[in-house]
Image (spheres, grey):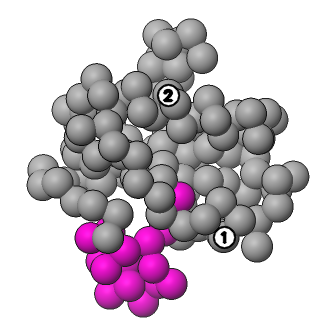
Amino acid sequence: MLLEKDIKFLIIHCSDTNNSLTARDIHKMHLKFGWDGIGYHKIIQKSGKIENGRPEYWIGAHVKGKNTSSLGVCLIGRNKFTSKQYKSLEKVLKKWKLSYPEANIIGHCDTGNTKKTCPNFDVATWLKSVKF
């Protein structure tokens, strides 16, 4: 179980797919991996719709070595995200920062535990651009 005091990172991911997946699709896929279901806490569709994944109190399955200290949000797509997705991402992160003010916002690629390029954009630069 994740406690507020445990959350040190808010991690941005992408689905790295060209197709439009839903939280339900990702849940089914992650079950096939042998996981306890969807590994992310939030999913953001191309339309900007925000879908719930795991509850925030439930340890995620989205980044090796940091699941017990993070929440994960996943943008659907590979590298061409919509302005609506970015607006929704900002909304999710601002809400989370109210609950977890000490948490650092990083991309999956910035965790040090992967060779992935996910979320395929520079999170620090984006955060500065939206004056986060």
Q: Amino acid at mark 1?
A: Trp
Q: Work out which residue is located at the far left of the displayed protein and give it.
A: 19
**Where, by quadrant of the figure, is residue 15 drawn?**
bottom left
Q: Quadrant of residue 104?
A: top right
At horizontal 62% and vertical 44% (from top left) the residue drawn is 10
- Determine which residue is flagged by label 1: 58
Q: Position of residue 49 (x, y in %)?
A: 33, 43
Left or right, 26 with reference to 21: right
Which residue is rendered at x = 44% and y = 72% of the image?
38
The residue at 47%/58% (across/down) is 52
The vertical placement of 23 against 94, above or below, is below
Q: Earlier in the sequence, mark 2 or mark 1?
A: 1
Q: Which residues are magenta?
A: 25-41
Q: Position of residue 114 (x, y in %)?
A: 47, 55
Measured along the vertical axis of the image, is residue 32 above or below residue 13? below
**Residue type indicated by callout 2:** Glu
Q: Which residue is mark 2?
A: 90
